[in-house]
Image (cartoon, helix red, strand yellow):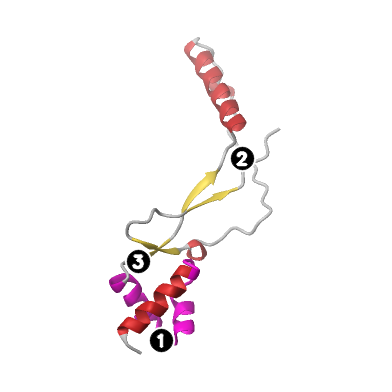
Amino acid sequence: MTTKEAKVIISTLLEEDRSKPCEEIAHEANMSATSVYRIGTQTLQDRNVAANWVPHQLSEEQKAARKRVAEELLRRYEAGEQFLNRIVAIDETWIRDFEPQLKSQSSQWKHATSPRPQKMSPPTIES
């Protein structure tokens, strides 16, 4: 197989699914993972990067509620109320109906000019 043929095969496989790891592409292209990585990074100018994790996507109502609470706390603080020592901070409770991915599972091939992929967890349920 020539380098041009390998480049076409690898670019086709990456266009189908950018989250394929080198080993899977190598198996499908019948070549070594090292060759796939070299062609992907040097010839095609792609990089295999992990997605940036964003805590969760908030709705407009959730953003407004958080802003109202923050403004109220700021107003009370500026008025001189001694309430900060009575606040108990706890972690948010997350209810997940999915299996979170490992960092290596969320990695994708991207071209040098493409933006970094993002993944979000679902918004929390607020009452």
Disc 1: which residue: 31
Label 2 packing within 10 angstroms: few (<14), some (14-19), many (20+):
few
Residue 38 drawn in magenta:
yes
What label sits on residue 71 in the rendered view? Answer: none
Measuring 36% from the left and 90% from the top, which residue is drawn there? 1
Q: Is residue 126 left or right of residue 107?
A: right
Q: Answer yes or no: do the residues labelled 1 and 3 have beta carbons within 8 Å?
A: no
Mark with earlier residue (3, 2): 3
Evaluate whether residue 85 shows in this view: no
Where is 64 relative to 111, above or below? above
Q: Which residues are magenta?
A: 16-43
Disc 2: which residue: 92
Residue 113 placement (x, y as % from top left):
33, 56
Residue 58 placement (x, y as % from top left):
57, 38
Label 1 packing within 10 angstroms: few (<14), some (14-19), many (20+):
some
Q: Is residue 50 left or right of residue 42?
A: right
Instruction: For marks 3 and 2, give the one nearer the viewer.
Output: 3
Disc 3: which residue: 46
Measuring 44% from the left and 87% from the top, which residue is drawn there? 30
